[in-house]
Image (spheres, grey):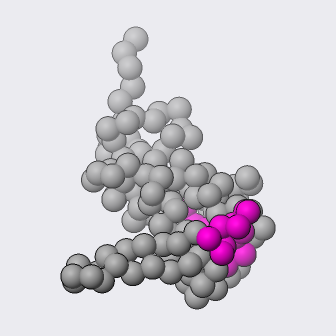
């Protein structure tokens, strides 16, 4: 008996939906990254892109525990000299909660071509409605 190795011909992708309402942002992001990478499958292969599609709804209702809303900051550099930008998470979650969720999920994926390809299968929505009903996603409970 030989070890199974997944490749592009024998990968079947499914769609999953995660409701982030009232759940910690990091827990939702960790579950999404796990599914995007394909680690929930018995046919997981580390060098192959065998993950599934993930839809996260209610990103604006995700919570941050402790004092993270007031103390945690997101930093990024524009590429210009002296242009290190920052935004507190309370403002980020009120203005653009999808960005906060995307940054959390992408931070848990590998920093290579597999991680970048996996991140394209992530769909984020601020509210309850989403445009992917035709794909018949399965609901995942945390």
Indicate left or right for 34 with 118 as reference. Answer: right
Q: In this view, does 101 lie above or below 142?
A: below
Q: Residue at x 45, y 57 (%)?
A: 107
Q: Residue at x 72, y 75 (%)?
A: 61
Q: Residue furthest front?
A: 82
Of 107 and 33, nearer the camera is 107
x then y, percent, for residue 63: 72, 68
Decide if residue 140 is in sight here: yes
Quarter location, residue 116: bottom left
Q: Which residue is drawn at 22% across and 83% down?
A: 80
x then y, percent, for residue 117: 34, 58
x then y, percent, for residue 140: 69, 55
Q: Give the range drawn in magenta.
A: 54-71
Q: Which residue is drawn at 41% across and 45% down?
A: 50
Q: Which residue lies furthest to the bottom in this view?
A: 95
Whether the magenta-drawn stretch holds residue 83 is answered as no
Q: Residue furthest top?
A: 1
x then y, percent, for residue 94: 64, 85
């Amino acid at each position: 008996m030989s070890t199974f190795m997944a490749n592009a011909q024998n990968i079947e992708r499914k769609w999953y939906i995660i409701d982030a309402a009232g759940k910690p942002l990091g827990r939702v992001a960790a579950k999404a990254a796990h599914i995007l990478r394909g680690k929930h499958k018995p046919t997981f292969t580390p060098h192959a892109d065998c993950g599934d599609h993930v839809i996260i709804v209610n990103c604006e209702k995700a919570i941050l525990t402790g004092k993270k809303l007031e103390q945690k900051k997101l930093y990024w550099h524009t590429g210009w000299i002296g242009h290190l930008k920052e935004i507190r998470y309370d403002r980020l979650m009120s203005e653009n909660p999808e960005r906060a969720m995307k940054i959390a999920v992408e931070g848990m994926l590998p920093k290579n071509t597999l991680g970048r390809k996996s991140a394209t299968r992530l769909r984020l929505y601020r509210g309850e409605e989403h445009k992917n009903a035709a794909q018949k996603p399965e609901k995942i409970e945390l």
